[in-house]
Amino acid sequence: MAENQNQHADEVVTHVRSQDVELPGGAGTFVLLTLDNAFDHTKPNSFGPAGLTELSDALDEAARRANAKEIVGLGITGKPFIFAVGADLKGVGTITSRDQALEIARQGHETFSKISDLSVPTFAFINGASMGGGVEIALYADYRTISSDVPAYATPEVFLGLVPGWGGTYLLPNLIGVENALKLIVENPLNQNRMIKGKDAFALGCADRLLEPVTFLEDSLAFAEGVISGEEKVERGSVDTDETAWDAAVSKMRKTADQRTGRAAISAYRALDLVAAARTASREEAFEAENQALADLIMSDELRAGLYAFDLVQRRAKRPAGAPDKSLARKISKVGIVGAGLMASQMAMLFIRQLKVPVVMTDLDQERVDKGVEYVHAEIDKLAAKGRISPDGVNRFKALVTGSTSKDGFADADFVIEAVFEQMSVKKKVWAEVEEIVTPECVLATNTSSLSITEMAEDLKHPERVVGFHFFNPVAVMPLLEIIRGEKTDDATFATAFAAGKGLKKTCILVKNSPSFVVNRLLGRFMGDAGRMVDEGTPIETVEKAFAGLTPMPPFMLISLVGPPIALHNSETLAKAFPDRFRASKNLAKVVEAKIPSFYGADGKIDPKVMELFDAPSDPKELTAEQVRESALASMADEIRRMLDEGVVAEVQDIDLAMITGAGFPFWNGGISPLLDRTGTSEKVTGSRFLAPGVASVPTS
């Protein structure tokens, strides 16, 4: 497609380096194409219009040489550590018509098909990260090798609001079977965009040989020589195309999609339809169906919201709004942690692994201290068993963590963080004790999820060195870190907190000192509303169903995950601060009083013991799932507008970023504000949209 020169302005072109390789044993000349956006080593290989044109030209030349009997085979590989990560989606915002979208879809198919159309054997040598179109281009080759250290292999399109539309929904199920293909195409993307490793991809049948990284290219070329010479035999299991089994697998995944998205993510269902048809469709029919699906989805609000979310986590997260001058940050050479429970132990593991500094944990008795240190040691051993830490690394990391019942070990610490009971008096007592030991410059960071930083620091001699440093559970997994500046927090403390957060590889968001900050305030609003509706007579099952596709999990499941006592405390904090719209559920209080840890039983259903505690309302008001959802969306729109008016964060983008990285809100909604805009809830409730038209949505003109 040399005539297609509609490169978007900021495309980082992935070039194609072609070289001839003489295969061992006199097998002949082999062409090796290496994908490499050589002018920007900071970005992975991707496929934009200009890059696809260059690849197409290289394949045309290879076809000419193959037909002339000048070459015996062709292989495609990537630059070091990167094979390819799919389509370059930065230009989607410039697409204004479905015809343009259709052209891009067809260009991918037409270019990649030139690989499988070659008259010589073709190979894909998957040497590094492979996602989306990177997975798909390899499927067009006759044979594939994959490195055992490939860190990420995935088809994440549904996560963003697309489908694997350059051959994936047809080629994958017909290579590895429908069940395995659906895991990659639908289930993993809906599971917070889960990636798999190279070894896992090989186990699924995505490659013919699993090779070690040190000699990967050499061994891949030897494999190609063996195949071409006939010495290497490749055996693959047959794919079951029985209609009943195939349809059952698709039907099962539809139910999973229903549970995860509430049928709100149209991309998941387009992908399911395409995979369902792949059993009997011809390649040409399947590819054209993918073209049409891509054209529709590229012009959808769902994709624009997904790309908006992707931009937030890739760009805004790296340049936090309001971040202080990093030159003001003090060096952290030792960390103290008050507490040795699960949250504190997770933090200790994170600090020693990322900052590689000594960490000392304290608690009320030696048994708790020992348990905390043992947890960290066990986590280190787990990483070692997976090959993530060397034997020497194990010893170094274990030596960095110590525990004590005394806080005297904090005397030379530069950064002390508390993870104690969420009660102001307890936290004030802790900081009063710590302040008597640490230096005046030591940063005192609180992991509070809802309490005032200013109030917590007001009785200290040096309130200027207290800062909010709120992690989300599990600490190692959730990217978000809310950094809260108290009324007297000074610039050096603030800068040190941001530098520490960056060193911990967290997404840091500046939050104004306010009740429950960002994530817990919004979660508190929707969970509080859910509790109110149940208290008034709507069945829990109806409320849970209403939130599918809106939140990462239903409200009462979330309450069970964080723990009813913590959820109740957050509700009470918000009800005290904002009694006009927050209230703590009396029935939730009963569950806490009865010390029932979850609303759900072992069978995954609502625990009857919980329902026995609930008071029946005198005048029941039972809502439908649709009414529950409308009410929840309206409440969230109202609360977001209030938070913006109060200056809790700089812009609504920070709220969306927080809800995505701290609460797992789905990409296909763009977090929350794009959904509120496109449903009309924003304007109905607050009088205006949160985002300008065309941001996270398709331009109307």
Image (tube, rainbow, N blue to C red):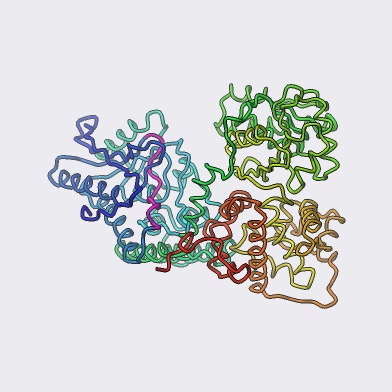
Query: Quarter holding the C terminus?
Result: bottom left
Residue furthest out toward the left: 68
Q: Nearer the viewer, residue 539 or 677?
A: 677
Q: How many marks?
A: 0
Residue at point 58% right, 53% down? 651
Q: Position of residue 673 (x, y in %)?
A: 57, 60
The picture quadrant where one finds residue 300 is: bottom left
Q: Answer left or right for 433 relative to 122.
A: right
| Residue 461 coordinates in the image, percent (x, y) | 81, 31
In the rendered structure, which segment of residues is drawn in magenta? 80-93
Residue at 63 percent across and 22 percent down: it is 395
Q: In the displayed structure, does residue 84 sit left or right of residue 315?
A: left
| Nearer to me, 414 or 223 | 414
Q: Is residue 391 above or below residue 592?
A: above
- Is residue 94 something that shows in the picture? yes
Q: Confirm whether residue 246 shows in the render.
A: no
Queried whether the magenta region covers residue 83, the answer comes back as yes
Counting from the top left corner in percent of width and height, residue 479 is at 60, 44
Q: Residue 49: within the magenta?
A: no
* Image location of residue 362, percent across then percent down: 79, 30
Question: Which quarter of the figure has residue 406?
Answer: top right
Closest to the observer, 359 or 152 = 359
- Drawn side of residue 578 relative to residue 310, left or right: right
